[in-house]
Image (cartoon, rainbow, N blue to C red):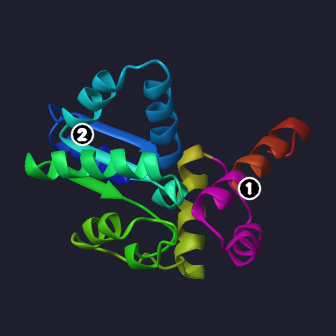
Amino acid sequence: MHAIGWKIKQQQPERKVIYLSAEKFMYQFVRALRYKDTSAFKEQFRSIDVLMIDDVQFISGKDNTQEEFFHTFNALIEQNKQIVISADKSPSDLDGVQDRLKSRLGCGLVADIHPTTYELRLGILIEKAQKRGVEIPPKVLEFLSHRIISNVREMEGALNRLVAHATLVGTK
């Protein structure tokens, strides 16, 4: 998601892009309701070029938030704006999400992103280490690549902790 946002801003810096988690979208909506400022909320989200919402499954069961998201989605589509959504399931498999919202989410390009391969994880670690200017024994990078398969952020965090520890104990 971040890479998409950065690429858009790099190619077209004038475009207004908002990236946030579904949880933060929900929090901002509830706050707007509480302070009776829904018009400012709507203006903020409906006057942009690209809306990026991460982990949309978190609005599952939140009917009022889904209702507002549905209307925001429609308003942006009517203006030929872009919407990028991520979720841990395909739109049709999102439990607790209204059918009409599932339908809207499913009408776009749906891409299933598979877990990374060992080779890709190892390549990422090698590149990250090189960019940081640190030398890490190949066996250590191979170990991390085999052990951390859940996501790249976790793998990068392990690399950061390893480098920090080596720096602190003076084994860098």
Q: Which residues are magenta?
A: 134-157
| Residue 58 included in the magenta stretch of the image | no
Q: Nearer the viewer, residue 52 or 4?
A: 52
The quadrant of the rendering that contains the C terminus is top right
Task: Report, in whole angstroms, how far the alpha carbon at label 2 lies from the one at label 1.
Answer: 29 Å
* Residue found at the very far right of the displayed protein: 169
In the rendered structure, which amino acid carries the disc numbered 1?
Answer: Ala
In the rendered view, does 95 fall on the left or right side of 107? right
Residue 171 vertical position relative to residue 106 in the rendered view, above or below: above
Q: Position of residue 162 (x, y in %)?
A: 78, 51
The rendered magenta stretch, by its main secondary structure, is classed as: helix
- For label 2, the residue is 9
Question: Residue at coordinates 23% horizontally, 44% vertically from top-left?
Answer: 50
Question: SS of the residue at dot 1?
Answer: helix
User: Which x, y percent locates residue 120?
Assistant: 52, 75
Relative to 16, is 94 on the left or the right? right
Q: Quadrant of residue 11?
A: top left
| Residue at (27% x, 38% y) in the render | 17
* Foreground label between 2 and 1: 2
Picture quarter with the N terminus: bottom left
Residue tagged by mark 1? 158
The question of residue 141 being in magenta is answered with: yes
* Whole-percent x, y for residue 13 in the image: 18, 34
Give SS at disc 2.
helix
